Amino acid sequence: MVDDTAVDIFLETLKQLLTSSKLGLIIDEKRQLQFLDENIKYLRGFLKITEKNRKEHAEVMELVTRIRDVVLEAENIVELYVVYAFKTDASCSLQENRDHLFLDIESVKKEIETLTVKVKQIYDLKTYENDGGAAKKHRHSSTKSGSIGTYFQYFKLQI
């Protein structure tokens, strides 16, 4: 879906930041960037498998909207941080001026964690239904090929 393109673009930006030769400017925040990269990839997987059926389920559409919103907020925070880091580095080489610079993703981190839990609950519902009720460990990657429409009728999670 076209609307999911922004998520893909941000994931590409994160990939470039994490592999950049200029990583020295943002090395202190590598762990934060990795958190965003890993969790947004997971949420992107959910967007991908719900692409065809999401409009049929209001709860899923709301979750999709929340995912997109938090990704855009994270993108804004990261872009502002990177611009400021490069600007600060270009204007002076004193380390003390960069010591006050940090990537503050706490607000989006909590929302991403909440959304990740919700997505995992949905995957667990699908796994439960597909196994006839047998509890079984579910891998995210195995959801790519299956239809998700059948288990959304059990989707009673508060979003």
Image: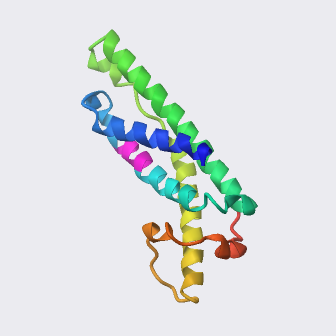
Which residue is drawn at the image coordinates 72% and 61% (left, top)? Answer: 59
Q: Residue 78's x, y, as percent? A: 46, 33
Q: Quadrant location of the C terminus?
A: bottom right
Nearest the viewer among 38 and 57 is: 57
- Relative vertical location of residue 149 with respect to residue 44 in this rendering, above or below: below
Which residue is drawn at the image coordinates 43% and 22% (left, top)? Answer: 83
Q: Residue 153's x, y, as percent? A: 72, 74
Q: How is the image coloured?
A: rainbow
- Relative vertical location of residue 61 with respect to residue 70 in this rendering, above or below: below
Residue 36 colored in magenta in the image: yes
Q: Is residue 81 left or right of residue 114?
A: left
Nearest the viewer among 24 and 110 is: 24
Which residue is drawn at the image coordinates 60% and 44% (left, top)? Answer: 2
Residue 9 colored in magenta in the image: no
- Relative vertical location of residue 133 with respect to residue 47 in this rendering, above or below: below
**Residue 52 falls in which quadrant of the image?**
bottom right
Give the extent of the magenta segment.
Answer: 31-37
Q: Residue 11's x, y, as percent? A: 44, 43
Q: Is residue 89 left or right of residue 54?
A: left
Q: Is residue 153 left or right of residue 80?
A: right
What type of secondary structure mainly makes up the magenta span?
helix
Task: Say whether residue 29 is visible.
Answer: no
- Relative vertical location of residue 129 with respect to residue 145 in this rendering, above or below: below
Which residue is drawn at the image coordinates 46% and 75% (left, top)? Answer: 138
